Image: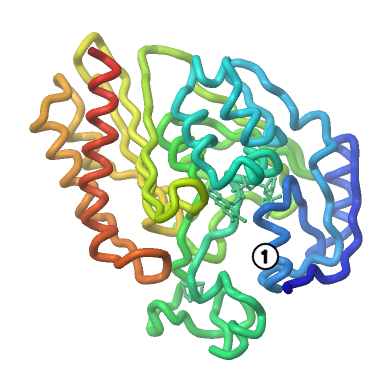
Amino acid sequence: MLRLPAFRYLEPRALADALRWKADAGPQGAYVAGGTDLYPNMKRRQQEPTVVVSLMGVKELKTAAETTLGGGLTLTQVADSPAVRRSAPAVAVAAGLVSTPLLRNMGTFGGNLCIDTRCNYYDQGYEWRKAIDFCMKKDGAICWVAPSSPRCWAVSSSDIAPVMVAIGAEYRLVGPAGERVVPAGRFYHNDGINYLTKQPDEILVDVRLPRANGWDAVYHKLRRRGSFDFPVLGVAAWVRWEGKRVADARVVLGGVASYPQEVPGAGEALRGGELTDDRIAAAAQAAYVPSKPLDNTDFELSWRKQMTRVYVTRALEELRQRNR
Ligand SMILES: Cc1cc2nc3c(=O)[nH]c(=O)nc-3n(C[C@H](O)[C@H](O)[C@H](O)COP(=O)(O)OP(=O)(O)OC[C@H]3O[C@@H](n4cnc5c(N)ncnc54)[C@H](O)[C@@H]3O)c2cc1C
Ligand code: SF4
């Protein structure tokens, strides 16, 4: 059985205390929300904080308004919220597709948007990783997926992050130096180690969803076990309708790179006319080309790449269906 290492656990009730206690802990401190990502990582010694600052009691993270969702809401609260299902159904769908009911009751919205990147050579116990002499993401020097690579290719595996980038959500971050708002697309780096642009002490307090102005979005997920697993491909598709005409569009892929990857060519293929079969096929092809999954998650990688075309097509067909 994997056991947690010893650590100090702090439970602030106010945002200011959380920020101060984390700053006091220095680089050895970490925030935790539901702990469904951090604690397994600590058990595997992938992350080794000695002070853990819980965000679960921080009231500023609990906002639940039509277009502002607190980072501390549970995934169940987001998935079941009538307001979210009405104003941004793709967000509720993506939250409802995360893992299992138990994990959704514990795991939070903010935690999901910040989860660690994943890789078959990294998401292993300490002894397993030691046996291969570790890898550059933690304790080692080499990447076992691409040994000549200077960077880590661990995969962005959040279900909700691609939706946030596709719909153009904004994240409100509060840190010791103050507050800033960043577009979701600028919150993620295509780097398996430094995968967030967030400073370590900053807290994702809430997320602002765009107001209704004719937009709609959907999310489709590929995974092995439909009731449990992380995505090995996620497709978020967003359009702004003018009647039947696509005025603007974005397609964002999860599970294929170290960040939620927007495919500009797919958006271009969709803009300026009705959502015809030809436009959908062109967008699916545009997404297929840059979708370059590596051999570090589930399934055979060339099959996963082919599935990009299939899942983008399905997502866009759903959008078309909803605008009938
Ligand atoms: C078996 C299993 C299956 C899973 N399946 C999926 C899946 O299908 N899809 C999926 O997307 N995820 C999946 N997960 C991952 C995880 O359960 C969810 O992503 C969950 O939403 C994480 O939220 P949390 O509150 O538990 O995060 P935590 O573990 O508490 O935190 C995760 C990270 O985010 C940071 N953090 C948390 N909240 C904040 C905040 N407000 N501000 C700044 N930093 C913050 C923490 O410091 C930590 O680094 C799975 C996990 C397990 C164990
Ligand atoms: S992609 Fe390479 S460096 Fe990154 S976690 Fe996997 S093996 Fe390690």
- Where residue 122 sits, quadrant-wise, is bottom right
Tell me where residue 272 appears, x and y as whole percent: 17, 22
Q: Is residue 192 left or right of residue 114?
A: left
Residue reaching furthest to the left = 278
The residue under label 1 is which amino acid type?
Asn
Q: Nearer the viewer, residue 217 or 101?
A: 101
Q: Is residue 238 left or right of residue 26?
A: left
Q: Is residue 51 left or right of residue 214?
A: right
Tell me where residue 1 appears, x and y as whole percent: 73, 73
Q: Is residue 173 left or right of residue 5?
A: left
- Indicate whether 101 appears above or below 150: above
- Where residue 150 sits, quadrant-wise, is bottom left
Q: Residue at x 89, y 56 (%)?
A: 9
Q: Residue at x 37, y 19 (%)?
A: 215
Tell me where residue 17 appears, x and y as whole percent: 90, 41
Tell me where residue 159 appears, x and y as whole percent: 49, 44
Point out the image quarter for the C terminus: top left
Assign a secondary structure to mark 1: helix
- Label 1, ligand 1: CB separation under 8 Å: yes
Q: Residue at x 70, y 58 (%)?
A: 38
Residue to which mark 1 is pinned: 41
- Indicate whether 9 appears above or below 309: below
Q: Residue at x 25, y 31 (%)?
A: 316
